[in-house]
């Protein structure tokens, strides 16, 4: 069982959402093995009761900090870690179900919607071949390309494009997979490396790897699970940054419009090369390269915040509204306007299922009484909420 699987199920349960029979069985098995969660439920409810007397951002800070104290205090007990993570997700400001779980104060306010048809993204992409041909990819399993002397057999299986290893030869073709805004797609390269591509991203790669290293070029965001091969290092080129690995799992965020390139390491070890130098980072660390001034910042992070998108949800932790909306713009294919620039700096935290209705998400953010959203078509206007 994956550690964050329990976190996600508990977060859904705390948020008052329905869970499947299979998830309920997983939860019951975990409770039997862990000794139950009741006493932590009482602690969390006490926090909620005290927080109900506060308002807006002061309440969010209070609730978040108290939950964090429980996490630190109980860190030594394994099953507390699971519940603490889920509780922290479920009780921090904005995207959470705090009001659903403890309805001490209800609100009749709702997201203003005018003829909206906003839907989440889905599995769609384009495969661009060397001579400019474009093959549209969808979830129907099919053979995209048959094998020949240059190109191995390529199939699209569900939401994943898979390359056979193929025969080694002197000539190598390069393909490009393009994922539009509102899309996602996965890729298994000829060496077995798995790549998860987020909305608005593209990857250029050889149909098979030859020479001294395996090299691909990324624009946008991708999560890589690299097949180990000590004789042939794997290199991701992302603008001014090269990430060199032997076999590991990591995320690279390198959208052209952003001022930074961020590499987040989940497991293994990577060396990040940039214009002014290079650094090796360890699991749980993130290196952020500033494209404007060449400065580098390395820090320890909660990797789930930066990789949860590939597992079907977003996890925001005290994140600026502008950064959250940038993520949603690519996934839901939106246009966003801000009535006041200072609204961009409002901080939110919580967990959002990647395929949820956006109205549910925005309503949860509106419950802070700091902001409101007006939706018209695929355009969202962000306004200061007035009492």
Image (spheres, rainbow, N blue to C red):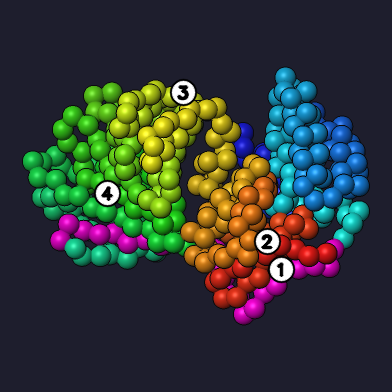
Nearest to the observer: residue 294 or residue 68: 294
* SS type, badge 3: loop
Quickly name the residue at label 1.
111
State if disc 3 and disc 2 touch (CB < 8 Å): no
Q: Cα distance, mark 4 to mark 3?
A: 26 Å
Q: Which mark is residue 282?
A: 3
* SS type, badge 2: helix
Q: Is residue 352 visible?
A: no
Nearest to the observer: residue 136 or residue 375: 375
**Residue range (magenta):** 107-131
Instruction: Give the mark nearest the N terminus, 4 or 1.
Output: 1
Instruction: Give the mark nearest the N terminus, 1 or 2.
Output: 1
Instruction: Give the mark nearest the N terminus, 2 or 4.
Output: 4
Note whether 299 is above or below 29 in the view shown. above
Instruction: Give the mark nearest the N terminus, 2 or 3.
Output: 3
Quickly name the residue at label 4.
204
**How many neighbours does mark 4 have within 10 angstroms: few (below 14), some (14-19), or many (20 or more)?**
some
Quickly name the residue at label 2.
362
Q: Residue at x 46, y 23 (%)?
A: 282
Nearest to the observer: residue 264 or residue 39: 264
Q: Cα distance, mark 4 to mark 1?
A: 40 Å
- Residue 143's quadrant in the figure? bottom left
Note whether 324 is above or below 295 in the view shown. below
State if disc 2 and disc 1 touch (CB < 8 Å): yes
Nearest to the observer: residue 59 or residue 147: 59
**Residue 187 as seen in the image, left or right of residue 35:** left
* SS type, badge 1: loop
């Amino acid at each position: 069982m994956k550690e964050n699987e329990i976190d996600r199920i508990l977060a859904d349960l705390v948020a008052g959402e329905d869970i499947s029979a299979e998830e309920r069985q997983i939860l019951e098995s975990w409770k039997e093995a862990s000794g139950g969660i009741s006493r932590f439920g009482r602690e969390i409810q006490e926090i909620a009761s005290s927080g109900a007397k506060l308002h807006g951002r002061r309440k969010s800070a209070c609730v978040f900090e108290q939950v964090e104290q429980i996490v630190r205090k109980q860190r030594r007990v394994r099953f507390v870690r699971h519940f603490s993570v889920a509780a922290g997700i479920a009780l921090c400001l904005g995207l959470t179900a705090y009001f659903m779980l403890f309805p001490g104060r209800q609100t009749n306010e709702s997201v203003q919607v005018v003829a909206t048809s906003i839907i989440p993204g889905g599995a769609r992409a384009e495969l661009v071949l060397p001579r400019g041909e474009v093959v549209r990819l969808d979830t129907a399993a099919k053979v995209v390309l048959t094998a020949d002397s240059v190109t191995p057999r390529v199939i699209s299986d569900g939401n994943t494009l898979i390359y056979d290893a193929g025969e080694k030869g002197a000539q190598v073709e390069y393909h490009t997979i393009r994922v539009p805004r509102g899309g996602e797609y996965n890729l298994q390269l000829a060496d077995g490396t798995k790549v998860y591509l987020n909305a608005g991203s593209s990857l250029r790669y050889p149909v098979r790897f030859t020479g001294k290293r395996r090299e691909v070029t990324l624009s946008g965001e991708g999560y890589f699970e690299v097949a180990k091969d000590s004789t042939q290092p794997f290199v991701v080129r992302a603008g001014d940054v090269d990430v060199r690995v032997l076999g590991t799992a990591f995320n690279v965020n390198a959208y052209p419009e952003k001022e930074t390139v961020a590499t987040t390491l989940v497991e293994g070890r990577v060396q990040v090369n940039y214009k002014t130098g290079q650094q090796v980072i360890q699991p749980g660390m993130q290196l952020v390269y500033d494209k404007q001034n060449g400065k580098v910042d390395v820090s320890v992070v909660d990797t789930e915040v930066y990789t949860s998108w590939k597992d079907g949800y977003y996890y925001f932790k005290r994140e600026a509204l502008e950064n959250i909306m940038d993520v949603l713009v690519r996934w839901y294919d939106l246009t966003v306007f801000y009535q006041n620039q200072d609204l961009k700096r409002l901080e939110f935290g919580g967990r959002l299922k990647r395929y949820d209705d956006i109205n549910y998400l925005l309503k949860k953010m509106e419950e802070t009484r700091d902001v409101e959203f007006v939706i018209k078509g695929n355009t969202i206007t962000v306004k200061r909420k007035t009492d």
